[in-house]
Image (cartoon, rainbow, N blue to C red):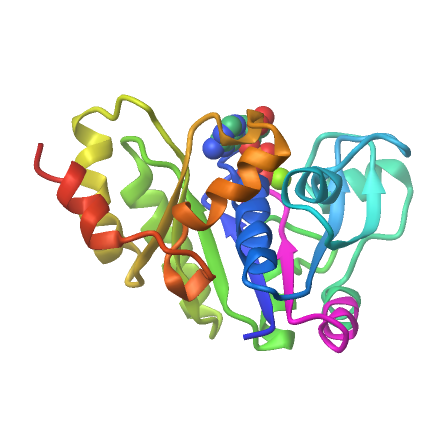
């Protein structure tokens, strides 16, 4: 798999932190990595965006952003309010495909959740993923409510013909409560795809060297890591 689309069950779930972990683990495994943010909203020119955050944490990746709109809104709305041309799915697919010719792995980070509009025609990240025939990894919360939002996202992805690679918990708490612990067991059924990792809460605040060293320990072997799903569940699920 060369192009991996990274979405989340919503905004502020940890897509960027998960993308950084994916990039760091792939780099540690000797892969070349590009990170593509089709539309960055809520920032002015010159401010560091999600791809800069991924590069800061993960290391030498090719970072690409196709458009930036200052309002912190869905890309379609933010583009409209800026009087700017929105980013269409063909543009996203073309950019990702081009990066894929020169990198082992291309990570495409969406904006918000899967069905957030990118343009005035109702196109979403899902349409770009469909054009690329790229699988979708879903960053999910650990807390109560995640089973529903995870199931909705996975079902919507499959309804659009997309393969769901799996889920990664965007922020695993230091002191998980009952819901978090049980969710480690139930997320797989909710997603209809495996839980492939858990990034600890606070990981985004680690210094980059510590982040890079730890990242493979947060992700399953399918994602170039050494995280053990059964061990993680055994530690938490039924406590
Ligand atoms: N594992 C984590 N460690 C530290 N901070 C996190 C973690 N997950 C999320 N955050 C914080 O929560 C916010 C949202 O995370 P982010 O990765 O930017 O989410 P998204 O890309 O889904 O909007 C950020 O301020 C980020 O620093
Ligand atoms: Mg982000």
Q: Is residue 235 visible?
A: yes
Q: Is residue 217 magenta?
A: no
Q: How many marks?
A: 0
Of the pair 230 and 166, the residue shown nearer to us = 230
Q: Quadrant of the C terminus?
A: top left
Specify the segment rendered in magenta. Answer: 95-114
Identify the residue at image location x=60%, y=64%.
Answer: 30
Q: Quadrant of residue 74?
A: top right
Q: Quadrant of residue 100?
A: bottom right
Percent x, y for residue 47? 84, 30
Identify the residue at image location x=79%, y=33%.
Answer: 48
Percent x, y for residue 198? 37, 43
Q: Is residue 114 visible?
A: no
Identify the residue at image location x=47%, y=41%.
Answer: 214
Left/right placement of residue 121 relative to residue 139 reads right
Of the pair 99 and 154, the residue shown nearer to us = 99
Look at the picture and state if 175 lies above or below 153: above
Look at the picture and state if 188 lies above or below 235: below
Q: Is residue 96 magenta?
A: yes
Of the pair 57 and 113, the residue shown nearer to us = 57
Percent x, y for residue 7? 53, 52
Where is ligand 1, by quadrant? top right
Left/right placement of residue 107 relative to residue 213 reads right
Q: Quadrant of residue 146?
A: top left
């Amino acid at each position: 798999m060369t192009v991996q689309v990274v979405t989340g069950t919503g905004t502020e779930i940890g897509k960027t932190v998960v993308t950084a972990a994916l990039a760091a683990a792939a780099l540690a495994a000797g892969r070349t990595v590009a990170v593509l943010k089709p539309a960055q909203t809520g920032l002015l020119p010159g401010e560091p965006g999600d791809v800069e955050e991924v590069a800061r944490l993960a290391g030498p990746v090719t970072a690409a952003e196709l458009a930036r709109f200052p309002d912190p809104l869905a890309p379609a709305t933010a583009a409209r309010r800026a009087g700017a041309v929105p980013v269409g799915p063909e543009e996203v697919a073309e950019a990702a495909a081009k990066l894929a010719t020169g990198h082992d792995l291309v990570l495409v980070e969406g904006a918000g959740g899967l069905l957030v509009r990118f343009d005035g025609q109702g196109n979403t990240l899902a349409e770009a993923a469909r054009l690329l025939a790229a699988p979708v990894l879903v960053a999910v919360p650990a807390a109560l409510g995640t089973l529903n939002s995870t199931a909705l996202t996975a079902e919507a992805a499959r309804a659009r013909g997309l393969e769901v690679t799996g889920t990664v918990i965007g922020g695993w708490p230091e002191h998980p409560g009952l819901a978090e612990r049980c969710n480690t067991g139930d997320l797989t059924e909710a997603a209809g795809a495996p839980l492939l990792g858990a990034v600890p809460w606070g990981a985004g605040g680690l210094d980059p060297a510590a982040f890079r060293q730890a990242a493979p320990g947060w992700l399953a072997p399918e994602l170039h890591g050494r995280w053990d799903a059964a061990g993680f569940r055994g530690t938490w699920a039924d406590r």
